Structure formats: structure tokens, C-alpha cells
Image (cartoon, helix red, strand yellow):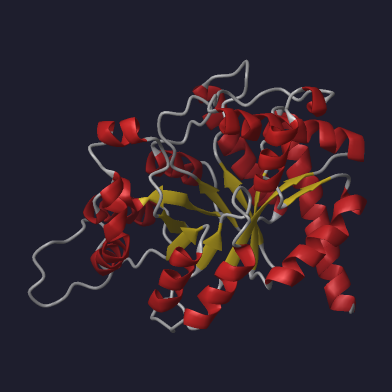
Amino acid sequence: MIPFSILDLAFVPEGGTPRDALHRSLDLARHAEALGYNRFWLAEHHNMVGIASAATSVVIGYVAGGTKTIRVGSGGIMLPNHSPLVIAEQFGTLETLYPGRIDIGLGRAPGTDQRTLRALRRSYESAESFPQDVMELRALLGPSQPGQTIHAVPGTGLEVPLWILGSSTFGAQLAGMLGLPYAFASHFAPASLHEALRAYRAHFQPSAQLDRPYAMVAANVITAGTDAEAKRLFTSAQQSFTRMVRGTRGLLPAPIDDIESFWTPAEKAQASSMLACSFVGKPDSIRGQLEDFIASTGADELIVAAAIHDHSARLRSYEMLAGIRESLGHAMAAG
């Protein structure tokens, strides 16, 4: 069966603090490692009170330092917010400290609003140089070349694996042309999923890093002992996406009994569209759905997000998902 991985946004729950969120991220990563998950990625977002992973490379170091074998990386670093040299130095340092365990997932979106971009001393125009910035970063992490005057220390020669992240065909085509693995953000922007995967595979050219296309797709997965319990846990994500539609982001809300009383029909339609790649229910209810999703995308890896307010319920959900993965693997082997 294909590898399963985790995308963690270090959600700050209502009633909790960023410190709580970061400690829970490390605890989740340790559980994920014990359960056989392949990688644990954290995302860069700025000026969002409900997400504690803004200093993404720092959090990656914290998680990598508290685990032993699981790959840890960014899902992603928003490269337009940074100079390629700084990212090469940061991730070169991480790779030096935790060799063979670090990934650099790169996104083109700013991951924030226009005012915060100004506070970052960046602009929306920075995204226009994304392809060139990716190639510059790859060169900085590659072997030193004759006459090269700028080096990432540490970083040069470490060739930390790069990924392109995206939710459209732009990133898919770029990943293909550069011969890099590609991760699609179907957990919140699923509309172009299949089109982007086709574009990635059609444009793929082998590189020193990768000789064949490698696509990872994202999904929200929440599982529990009963369908009703899982659906109640999912209302935290549904509330969060509705608040996103309203422009009133906040901390990760506690689940509620009646989501229909929370959103309007228009909000429900928009939030549900964004959450279309979500699998919610007890393991027996979602096993077949996950298998169909993986088969329809031809994914080489699945990365899972689970915005669950209660930390113990989140740990339990990922534990049950690991059991689903194992049963899928047995079924495919038997077939």
C-alpha cells in the first residue's frame, strides 16, 4: 500500500495557546512515527491566531529533534516570502542536524494577506519569480560549481529533497518540467486535482532527484468509533472553513452538535466545496472511499490533515487511520 503521511498546521484550539499547539504537534509526530507514517509536514502561515507554525523551519527543527526516524518537512515554505539563500541555509542546517530526514515542500502563494506581506517586506509580485527562485534554491543545495561565489553554509552539496506544492496546473507543470515530486492541496482546494495530476505527469522530465513522476495528494480524514462521533469532530473543520468564507478566522473551534445551525446554505455550499476531499466516519465507512480516492488519482502517497479540536481524539483518529492503511495493504496484496 502507498505511504501515508501527515500535514499538521499546529492548530491553536479554543481554550489553548500556541505553546499547547506546538507541544501537541510534537506529540502527534511521535505517535505518527510509532504508527509507521512516512513524513510529517508543517505549513507556513502568517498573522493567523489559529496556526502556530509561522516560523516553519524552527518548528521543523523542534519536531525533528523530538523524533528519530520519520521524515519532517514543510508543506510548505512559501518561497516568495524568502530569499532562496536563507531557505538553503535554514534547511541545510536542518539536514546537517537530522540527516536524511528533511523535506522542503515549496509553495508559490504568500500564505497570508496583503498587509502582512508588506510586514514581511514582500509583495505579490514576488510570486512571479517562483520558478527562478526554485532553481536558485536547487543550485544552492547542489554541488559547488567552479567559480561559484555564493554558498549556503551549511547547505551546499546536501541536496535536500525539493517538492513543489500547488492547487492548480501552474505548479504541476513546473514540478514536471523540473523533475520534482508534486503535492496537490486537495484538502482545501480540490477543484483542479485531476487536471493538475494529468499536467504533472504529461510534463514530467527525469532529473537527478527523480526519474519518474511522484505525486502526493492531500485529504482531510477524520475517523472515530462511530460515524456520528467522527461527523461531530469534523464540525470543527467545517466551522473553520465557514469562518474563512466570512473573513473571520480564529482559533480552532470546539465541535458542535448541529452544524446546520451554524452556516447559511451559501456558506455550506462554499465550505463543503473546499472540503470535498474529506473522508469522515468510522473505519469501515471510509475504507472503501479512501481506496477509491487513491485509485482515481493514481497517487504515490497520501498526506492527511485532521483539524480535530481534542488532542486525544486526533491521536486516536490517526491511529485508526493507520489501521485502515494496513487493511488496504493486506487487501491489495491478497488481490
Picture quadrant of residue 138: bottom left
Residue 52, x across and y down, in percent = 48, 31
Q: Could you say which quadrant of the image residue 92 lies in?
A: bottom left
Residue 21, above or below 157: above
Q: Is residue 308 visible?
A: no
- Residue 154 placement (x, y as % from top left): 25, 56
Q: Is residue 279 above or below residue 271?
A: below
Query: On the picture, is 195 further left or further right than 211?
Result: right
Residue drawn at the location 82% of the way across and 31% of the way down: 232
Q: Residue at x 54, y 62 (%)?
A: 183
Query: Compared to 217, does 330 lie above or below?
Result: below
Residue 252 in the figure: left or right of residue 157: right
Q: Is residue 330 left or right of residue 131?
A: right
Q: Give x and y (percent) for residue 220.
A: 69, 47
Query: In the image, what residue occupies the spot 84% across and 24% down?
Result: 258
**Residue ranking furthest to the front:** 266
Q: Position of residue 21 (x, y in %)?
A: 56, 28
